[in-house]
Amino acid sequence: MSSKRVEVRTPDEIRASVARFNQQARAAAARVRALLRSTKYWVFDPTTGEFGPGKFVGFAGIDLDVYEASLRGEVGGAPFDGNFTCRAIEKALDMEFTTDPHMAARLVAWGEALLGAGAFEGARGGQTTWKFVALPASTPKHWKIAPGEQATFWDENRESGIIAVGWGEAGDPRSVESRGALEAHYTRVFKYTKEKAQANVRMVWWFLRDIKPGHIIVANQGQSKVVGRGVVLGPPEFRGERGEYANCLPVHWFDTQKRDIARQKHWFATVLPMTAEVYEALFGALEEGEAMEGDPAGGAEDSSAAEGSRRPDIYGYLRDCGLHFPAELVTTYLLSLKTKPFVIFSGISGTGKTKLAQAVAEWAGSEEGGDLKEEKEHEAREMEPVRRHEFISVRPDWLDGKEVLGFYNVLTEAYTTRPFLSLLLRAHRDPGKPHFAILDEMNLARVEHYFADLLSATESRTLRGGKLQQEALHLHDEQRCLPLVRPEGWQRPARCASCRAREEEVDGCPLHFEGVQLVPPRLKMPPNVYITGTVNIDETTHTFSSKVLDRANVIEFNEVDLLGYGQQAEPGRFTLKNGRLDLGVATPARQDDFLDLPDRARTTLAALNGILRGSNLHFGYRVANEIALYVKNAVEHVGPNAVDTALDLQVLQKVLPKLHGSKQKLLEPLRRLLLFAVLGNDVEKDRDAQELDRIEEALRRGEPVPPPVEGEAERVVMTRSAAKLSWMLRTLRAQGFVSFLE
């Protein structure tokens, strides 16, 4: 439609006009939310991220000529400026808009006229272009599309504003006139069977012909996680430069919050239609008011809440398994894993160390589902349980890393794996779920010999620009990925032809094709892998070096209550909110964690380190940062009053385990540490030997600590650390040598 040209205003005039209009439009947003939810138009502002039903923000950014022509009634047949639009909508609310077809028709006609005149195809004056999408009058369709196996390309799709699927090697399918012709073409290119060609072409045909602008895309990761939702903005495109994933749809991702959902047993294909009932069941609560990303009215909830309806609380789960552990022990184990994915269970044999590690791994990491099945290969198969933990028995003859990382077999020209490496590779393919390695009797061999590479790789992690960076594990010297097995007739995928298994190529690849697992030359330790080692201390085992203990949380299992055996333990105060904690992906502790500690906690750690420094037993910045992160996690997941308990537990788990030696070396620092743990300050000169003996005896009996002179009994500041230090002092005096690990 032609329109009379008008003089274009300056950018400053445009910005001022837009600012005035947006201020008025946002003021009316609350009133028009319910109205626009029932209309067939969605408005999107990419600057603020506001989009969709109930997100009315006005029409700034449209082509100035077309917009001003509409003000004079030359577009759409009636004048509608921004202010009038707001007033018209407010008036329509009072008139019950849905029953006023005349007002509805005027607004719809105006919007369609602006759309048809190209008002939203671009803007001048440096303004941001807005998209205006006319949805079909009926309920828009919904589609599930996987952005690569296990959402491998989700980040790239989200940032590019697209959803991309494969089959790009076969060229642009839009030029093929019929499904039959496309099936024949794919059979030639991909060597498909007839049934497989039909299944794959059906998905491509949906993608090209049935998905329309305004339809909703749900991006999934496997069968139990959604990574984003968006609305289609235009027709399909073929971008040949993208290689395999060349078939694209332009999408605005209005919701990029990752969520665990109930397992969808049919979500094993790349593209699938979704019924309105399924979509409502998954996202109905969100549509009714839960905040999406970028919505200032919303707030972030505990990420574990999404699992609440599917997973029992950990304390109840353990009781159902017939396991009875103190709630504080379970809580500190989960918080320790959250803080640093390496925990050592120490204590006498038969106290449940292995049982607790197995139960927590099954609770947090395993579920029924098909997350690790290739989506195009298993349409007719039953889903098998996904195993996300490995129980590994350490042997005394483990002398190097081959026992955990495997090795290249030159005779078979394949890689010989080990259970630990298999777990790493599964975790690499399934990055959204925690995976657990349980090393039973891990000190039967020297940990420094077989685990050195893994400890170094874990410690190399840093956060740079919000992204996790780390050194990779060296697996073999070949310049390409090696298969674990080589089935008869198996050929490398086409995408492997030009791949040299460089770091960036490995990071973005599932390393699993046609049921064959590939092993790259170098592999980064997946941050969703959690390691728990159980140890006993006797004549058949090895001690730990300080560099190993420095990298772990050490939790003791020495309490045995036979009279209370089998009875339900008291919950205590140090328990997780709702009994749940989402482990997700581990992130390294940083200096900011320490600086964010309350002043009292920082002062306590500094004073404690001062006592240890005199005997050259002090800890470094890494331990301080990790203690701080543990305290931060405890405050978040237990409560604001958990600081003192968390600090006490961290002194017990991170600082004291490295103490071992003779009476000459440890007597004085242990005395000072005990007084510090009892009183909260270093005042050893105020207590003579007899007073210290009375303190130790009171701690041994579990009684209040007597004061130095007559008065009220004193409250022990760090009860758990004080009790351990008291035991170590008694042992040191009696034997002349003591070690934290007994």
Image (cartoon, helix red, strand yellow):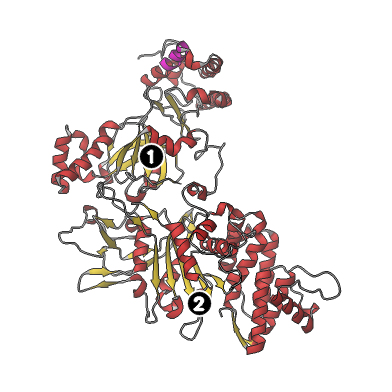
**47 over 331 or under it: above or below:** above
**Residue ID for mark 1:** 218
Q: Find disc 2 in the rendering and name its residue.
A: 349
Residue 290 vs residue 11, the one in the foreground? 290
Question: Image check: 139 left or right of 726?
Answer: left
Image location (x, y in percent) of residue 685 = 79, 79
Q: Which residues are magenta?
A: 101-109
Q: Which is nearer the eye, 571 or 73? A: 571
- In the rendered image, is residue 59 in sight? no
Image quadrant assignment for residue 42:
top left
Residue at horizontal 22 percent and vertical 42 percent from the top: 200
Q: Is residue 533 visible?
A: yes
How many residues crowd around disc 1 within 10 Å: few (fewer than 14), some, or many (20 or more)?
Answer: many
Name the residue at 48% across, 33% down.
287
Q: Nearer the viewer, mark 2 or mark 1?
A: 2
Q: Amino acid at mark 2?
A: Ser
Crowd class of label 2 (few under 14; some 14 to 19; many from 20; radius 10 Å): some
